[in-house]
Image (cartoon, helix red, strand yellow):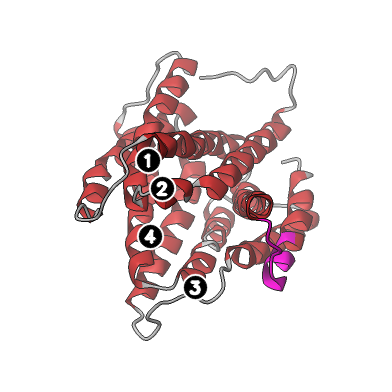
């Protein structure tokens, strides 16, 4: 197991460094993730690239753990469950975005930390200070506000997309909970290794969902650019596993889910030189306030 030097770093703050790193990586990833699509590389194929980008991260993690993989029945079941919930939810999300309005889908899914917080309090008996609870509330308010994209074309009369959206909402909330649950029973590196394996299992699905009748950019600005961007997501996912190992799920989940979109919005403002609407500005204010409160949590 990787050691982070308890003599040089207070263990109760280790989770914060990992959570903030995940926020930064996912924030940058969110700002640039659409670039390959604009260049002609389908978003659904980017899932396959993301799954492949998990491989080097998993190997590095195992190297840090002296190549010791937990392979008992409980470990591979828990690790695979975490991976299936995350990767499966992502595939469902891609399909949902084809049939439903993104401006409603993302704010709903963004509230998945609610599931994580409730389950962590109920089953893991986690607690937080009043200051942190205020931070959690502001973070949860910020997430859907930052995800709001304004009205887009979509068939709102058919609510099949809503059912799928709620499924992803539950799956991602459960994933974060089980990530914390598994961390108390197996190595973090093993969790990520099984996440990588289950992610690879869905590559045939992403390929099947791709419309190859349309022109696809296979050049440098296609899959190669996508890999550079997607590996930010993969590294962030690995660091998130560590964040859940050392921090409370009721703190880590809301903090990361509010902080990453905030960073994405800020970077996008610089890239596109646009002024956000009132809803997004409100979300930014809530995210900053909530993140500051959560970042001072010591447990």
Q: Position of residue 18 (x, y in %)?
A: 63, 35
Between disc 1 and disc 4, whose residue precedes? 4
The reply to whether the C-beta atoms of the residues labelled 1 and 2 are less than 8 Å apart is: yes
Nearer the observer: mark 3 or 2; the answer is 2
Magenta span contains residue 172: no
The reply to whether the C-beta atoms of the residues labelled 3 and 4 are less than 8 Å apart is: no
Hey, which residue is sitting farthest top in the picture? Answer: 66
Per the model, the C-alpha gap separating discs 1 and 2 is 6 Å
Per the model, the C-alpha gap separating discs 1 and 4 is 21 Å
Question: Along the horizontal axis of the image, is 31 left or right of 49?
Answer: right
As helix, strand or loop, the secondary structure at mark 3 comes to helix
Nearer the observer: mark 3 or 1; the answer is 1
- Residue 191 seen in render: no
Query: Which range is magenta?
Result: 273-284
Q: Quadrant of the C terminus?
A: top right
- Residue 274 seen in render: yes
**Relative depth, front residue between 93 and 2:** 93
As helix, strand or loop, the secondary structure at mark 1 comes to helix
Hey, which residue is sitting farthest bottom in the picture? Answer: 157
Quarter-of-image position of residue 149: bottom right
Residue identified by numbered label 2: 39
Residue identified by numbered label 1: 222
Residue identified by numbered label 4: 93
């Amino acid at each position: 197991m990787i050691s982070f030097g308890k003599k040089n770093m207070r263990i109760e703050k280790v989770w914060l460094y990992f959570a903030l790193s995940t926020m930064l990586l996912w924030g940058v990833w969110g700002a640039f993730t659409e670039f390959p699509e604009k260049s002609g590389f389908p978003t659904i194929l980017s899932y396959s690239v993301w799954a492949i980008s998990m491989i080097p991260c998993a190997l590095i993690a195992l190297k840090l753990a002296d190549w010791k993989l937990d392979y008992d029945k409980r470990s591979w079941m828990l690790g695979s469950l975490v991976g299936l919930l995350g990767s499966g939810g992502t595939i469902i999300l891609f399909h949902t975005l084809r049939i439903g309005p993104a401006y409603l889908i993302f704010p709903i899914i963004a509230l998945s930390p609610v599931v994580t917080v409730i389950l962590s309090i109920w089953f893991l008996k986690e607690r937080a200070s009043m200051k942190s609870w205020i931070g959690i509330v502001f973070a949860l308010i910020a997430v859907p506000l930052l995800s709001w994209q304004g009205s887009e074309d979509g068939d709102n009369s058919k609510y099949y997309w809503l059912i799928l959206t709620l499924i992803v909402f539950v799956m991602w909330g459960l994933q974060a909970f089980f990530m914390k649950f598994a961390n108390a029973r197996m190595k973090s590196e093993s969790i990520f290794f099984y996440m990588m394996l289950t992610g690879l299992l869905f590559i045939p699905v992403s390929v099947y969902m791709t419309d190859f009748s349309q022109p696809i950019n296979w050049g440098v600005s296609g899959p190669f650019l996508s890999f550079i961007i997607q590996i930010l997501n993969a590294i962030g996912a690995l660091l998130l596993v560590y964040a859940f190992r050392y921090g409370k799920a009721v703190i880590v989940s809301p903090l990361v889910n509010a902080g990453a979109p905030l960073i994405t919005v800020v970077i996008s403002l610089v890239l596109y030189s646009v002024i956000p609407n009132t809803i997004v500005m409100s979300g930014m204010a809530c995210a900053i306030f909530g993140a500051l409160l959560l970042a001072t949590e010591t447990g």
